[in-house]
Amino acid sequence: MRIPFEFTPVRIVAKKEFRDRIRNRWVLAAGAVFTVFALLIAYFGAAQQGEVGLRDMGVTIASLVSLVIYLVPLIALILGFDSIVGERERGSLDLLLSMPITRGELLLGKYLGLSAALACSTVAGFGAVGAILAVDLPSGALLPYAGFMASTLLLGMAFLSVALLVSVIATDRTRASGAAIAIWFFFVLAFDLLLLGVLVVGGGGWGADMLAYLMLLNPTDVFRFLNIFGFDDTRTLYGLATVFPRHLANPLLLATIMASWIALPLALATWRFHKK
């Protein structure tokens, strides 16, 4: 009798998914993109102020945060949007499900394999930049940078979880890709503009008390807070000290919220996959 869950099929699917990304050189390409853009921002991020070269670690991380918010969610969504719907269109999904594997095991295996590929590109890309920074900066400055890399991976895994949910719900790859682009546009570009519009319309009074809590509904904002509130100068630079209360800036709380952004869409995708 088949027990409800086994890890062996999950491991096999995850290994295959990871190897597929290695073969098509996706990890190498994404890692190279991270390295090039991170180096450009780290060295030339303050060129408009007449400064070039490595600066304070807090300012460097704040500059890299902007890169990550635009790039990592897009890469994660592109990586996962067709993971299920693509198998369905190719006709291989029925074949996979005819094997001794449950839908939950298949979905989790794909998620872990894609997450491993995303982790390799993130660590390779930003790790190379960290090694370069270590030459000119004190060793103690690398600890915040390691935290930045970890939070970057959490952000990517959150959007990868959302991508799998889209892939389960979508009826074809065209709709899945359109939904992925719309999600990226909403969370990365439109969400904060909508909140700002609410404040402007309300004259700064209506909705001001709820602004900080509403921002927690956006994983990119949670990622921003995780990295910026560790440095007083960057917090002042972003103007968040007057908007985001200190009791919400607890790193453990923010990391828990980010973990929820990983777990909840993945759980919903699993439920929907079983019902479909």
Image: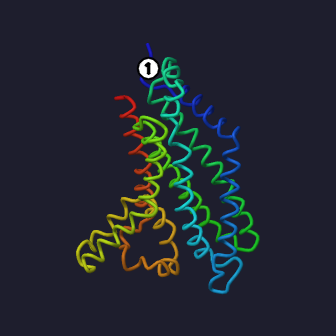
Q: In the rendering, at what x and y percent does residue 245 appear? A: 35, 73
Height in image: 237 above or below 27?
Answer: below
Q: Nearer the viewer, residue 13 or 246?
A: 13
Q: Residue furthest right?
A: 135
Report the coloring of the rendering.
rainbow
Indicate left or right for 139 with 61 as reference.
right
* Residue at the spot of label 1: 3
Work out which quarter of the rendered image holds the N terminus and state it: top left
Which residue in the rendered view is the most extreme toward the front? 174
Task: Say what secondary structure mark 1 lies in.
Answer: loop
Q: Residue farthest to the top?
A: 1
Q: Quadrant of the C terminus?
A: top left
- Residue at horizontal 68%, vertical 76%? 44
Q: Residue 248: image x %, image y %?
A: 37, 67
User: Number of numbered discs present?
Assistant: 1
Q: Crowding near pointer 1: few (<14 within 10 Å), some, many (20+)? A: few
Image quarter for residue 18? top right
* Left or right: 53 in relation to 185: right
Residue 167, horizontal then vertical, whole percent: 46, 39
Kind of residue sitting beneath label 1: Ile
Q: Quadrant of residue 104?
A: top left
In this image, 191 relative to 155: left or right? left
Q: Is residue 15 above or below residue 185?
A: above
Residue 119: x and y in percent read 61, 49
Q: Residue at x 75, y 74 (%)?
A: 136
Q: Residue placed farthest to the bottom in the image?
A: 50
Residue 15 is drawn in which quadrant? top right
Question: Residue drawn 64% across and 76% down?
Answer: 45
